[in-house]
Image (spheres, rainbow, N blue to C red):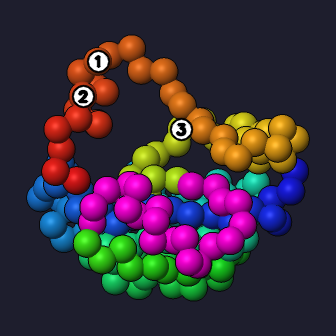
Amino acid sequence: MKSKEIVGVILAAGRGTRMEPFSSRYPKPLLPICNKPVLQYQIDHMRTIGIKEITIVIGHLGYEICSFLGDGSKYGVRLHYIEQGETLGIAHAVGQIESHISSPFFLFLGDLFLVWEKNLGSMIDTLFNTKAVAVLSVMKESDPEIIKKSFCCTNE
């Protein structure tokens, strides 16, 4: 695995409107699961597969994320922050990192909680071993209502 050639990116700029009123005071990626914010799980997953440099794209209440995570030293990584500005969706958020990152990157959506992270490192291996330009991890969801609730007709 060539994790030292990969940097991490976490998109954490959304407003979290589906989680109101919780998200009006806290950024959704800082909401805890078992007393630990989702972002911290993601940082831990990246560190486990050898990623030490992580950029977090912030927006709504981004100062709370910066304040909570700091420079990343307490998590064994170096954190950098980029302000998205206007939140215009995932593609726009990824576009914000273009001038800051020139290497391959491992991307998490800051509000998704991974229960099973066993093969994350194999994604990096696949990227380098197949000379792919991208590797995408997907999860099968058989309930169309859950898909609609998560990805359709939202204002985020």
Q: Which residue is mark 2?
A: 148
Label 2 vs label 3: CA separation? 21 Å
Please tell me whether mark 2 or mark 3 is closer to you in this view: 2
Q: Is residue 131 above or below residue 81?
A: above
Whole-percent x and y of residue 138?
Answer: 54, 31
Whole-percent x and y of residue 38?
Answer: 45, 56
Q: Quadrant of residue 107?
A: bottom right
The residue closer to the viewer here, 134 or 50, is 134
Q: Which mark is residue 144?
A: 1
Which residue is drawn at the image coordinates 25% and 72% (left, top)?
86
Judge whether residue 92 is colored magenta. Answer: yes
Residue at far top of view: 142
Residue at disc 1, secondary structure = helix
Which residue is drawn at the image coordinates 56% and 77% (left, top)?
99
Amino acid beneath label 3? Val
Q: Is residue 127 left or right of residue 38?
A: right
Report if the CB atoms under discs 2 and 1 are less than 8 Å apart. yes
Q: Which residues are magenta?
A: 87-107
The residue closer to the viewer here, 125 or 67, is 125
Amino acid beneath label 1? Pro
Amino acid beneath label 2? Lys
